[in-house]
Structure formats: structure tokens, C-alpha cells
Image (tube, rainbow, N blue to C red):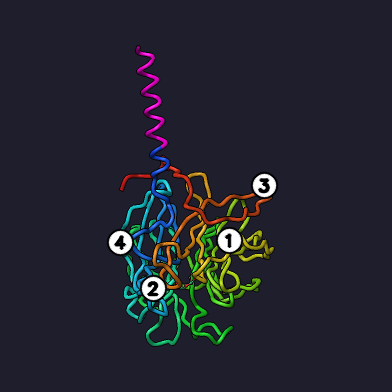
Amino acid sequence: MLKQNKRAAAIGMAVVLACIAVNAPAANPIVKNIYTGDPAALVDNGRVYLYVGHDEASATDTDYRMNEWRVYSSCDMANWTDHGSPVRFSTFAWAGKDAWAGDIVKRGSKYYFYSTVDHKTIPGKAIGVAVSDSPTGPFVDARGSALITNDMTQQTAIPWDDIDPAVFIDTDGQAYIYWGNTVLKYAKLKANMMELDGPILTFGMDAFTEAAYMHQHAGTYYLSYSRNFPEETAYSTGPTPTGPWHFRGAIMDKNAVVKTIHQAIIEFNGKSYIFYHNDKLPGGGEYRRSVAVEELKYKPDGTIEFIHQTTGPAANPSAACKAL
Ligand code: FUB
């Protein structure tokens, strides 16, 4: 009798678990109540923090309407906590509009958020840096002026070529900033993370469009970016954060509708992940995007396996994740 009860209980539990697996909400898109684009991510104390631009365009708008960045965090890459909007374009008094793509980095006990905005008095896009004592903000303008303005770069005549900052701190402590549209630019940053440290240089990347991103894995440097238009995600590898670069090809295909894709790559709890945006939230489109995440896998030779868009990775609970 006891044996039968145990068996029935085991079957019941199996049915419950199967139902949970079937009914578990898909991880993608990560944010289901608003449109979001341009992900940036940081792993801190076992928790992953996701920074996204808020796509506020209406269904009939013909351009981006982006006023703020929003922050989310997760202990398992499947369940996300909303931390609201701790930084807006108006955080920078010198910016007139456009909370476009940003990146987040921690140095010491400070969190630095680099972001694209439109400059009020120097025509074109510019890059600012905001700082906070917490990954969830509030962030304040670190300099009171733009770090990079359109008049500092002359490689192209377009006013939106100084966008999409990506910041990387190498193992020796040297920080670099990468950015650009059409031309991929980079410079060293001073240890204060608020000033360039030397000239602005360029990399000649194959069919570079925008969204440069640097990460390191097993001693190799990976420079990924959006290539062509509509964009696919491609990457090169090198032995240092400044190359020389070996082009490795595409790792994500272009989106069905939205022409941009904008990736960020991190390692979290023993696995690697790529964030990007598509148009899959109902009502989505070119200016109403949705951020998603996939697991990213390396082949034995260090190259990256091609990544397909899915409903999201399996939950990966991080024991190191502290309760907030
Ligand atoms: O979100 C505005 C712009 O679209 C970003 O700066 C680009 O990377 C593209 O995603």
C-alpha cells in the first residue's frame, strides 16, 4: 500500500513538473510590457544586469522615440526584476534628445554608463558617461560635458557616426572605448573612465555598420559588430584588444523585419550569452523592438557557433546571486 502511494506521488510530481516545463513563460522577449532595444549587460555579484533603450515610438512613427534607458536584473537568465529607469537623455544637461545605445562597466566600486545622445549645441550624436554607486542607479553625469562629439571625428560626414559606445577594461587595467557608425573608432580611456587617453584611431572592419562590442574569452579578444544593413552580427578575433583582427564571419542572421540587431555578450554562471533585439513582441517593428537572449557556445578552436533565435535559454540559477 505504502509502495503504491509512493508510486502515485512520484507520478503526480512528474506530471506537475512536466506541466511547469510546458507552461513556463518563454524567456524571450525579456521585457514583455514595453518595447526595448540596444541591450548592454553587466554581471556583478552573481547577478546579471541588463540595460536597454526604451522604444517609445507609436505604431505609425517613422523614427526612433527614445527618452530613457531601463534596467532589469536576473539571478538565472530566465526571471527578470524591473529596476525602472535610472538614467535618461536628460541626465546629460547638454543633450537634447535620443537615448540611443549604451554600455555599462564597473571599475572599483563605481558603475559607468556610456551612452549615445543628441548634442544640443554641437550638431550630431555624442557620447556621454554617467556614474553611479549602484548598478541600478541613480546615475549622474560624470563630466558635465560630452566625452565624444561629432566634431572630434572627421572620417565621415554623417552626423550619427559617433554612436554605440562599448567599453572594455583589459586584464592589465587599461580601458578602451569602441564606437561608431560606418567607421569603427576606438581610443584608450584614462583610469578615471571619464577622459580619452590618446588619439582616436580606427579599425577597418568588413562591411561595418555599428554596434561594436568587445569581450574576452579564454585569452582571446572578440570584436563583434553589426555588419551590412539590414544587419547581421559578425565578429573578428585577435590577441589584444586592439588587434590585429582575424575576420570570423557572421554569428547571427539579420532580423525578419527590424533592420538593426545590436548585440552584447557576457559570461554568466559558467555559460556565455548574447543579448540582441528583434521585432517579436506583438505590434513590434523598426522602432518598436524587443530585447532577447540566447546561449552562445564556443567551438574547441575558440570560434563561435552560429546562433539561432529561440524562445530563450534554459534557466541557469546562480548560487552566487545575492538577494536585493
Ligand atoms: O537605437 C538606435 C540605434 O539603432 C542604435 O544606436 C543602433 O545600434 C541601432 O540599434
Q: Which residues are magenta?
A: 1-18
The mark lying in front, picked from 3 and 1, is 1
Gap in Å between the C-alphas at discs 2 and 4? 15 Å
Tag 2's secondary structure? loop
Tag 3's secondary structure? loop
Residue labelled with disc 4: 84
Gap in Å between the C-alphas at discs 1 and 2? 25 Å
Quadrant for the N terminus, please.
top left
| First-in-chain label (1 vs 2) | 2
Depicted 120 relative to depicted 100: above or below:
below
Q: Residues within 10 Å of mark 3 (few under 14, many from 20)?
A: few
Q: Residue at x 38, y 56 (%)?
A: 109
Residue labelled with disc 2: 99
| Image location (x, y in percent) of residue 84 | 30, 61
Q: Residue at x 68, y 64 (%)?
A: 247
In the picture, measured across the screen, residue 143 lies left or right of residue 195, that is: left
| First-in-chain label (4 vs 3) | 4
Q: Which mark is residue 252?
A: 1
Depicted 244 relative to depicted 23: above or below:
below
Gap in Å between the C-alphas at discs 1 and 4? 29 Å
167 falls in the magenta region: no
Depth check: give the residue in front, 269 or 44.
269
Which amino acid type is marked by label 2?
Answer: Ala
Which amino acid type is marked by label 1?
Answer: Met
| Image location (x, y in percent) of residue 69 | 36, 67
Which amino acid type is marked by label 3?
Answer: Pro
Q: Which mark is residue 300?
A: 3
11 falls in the magenta region: yes
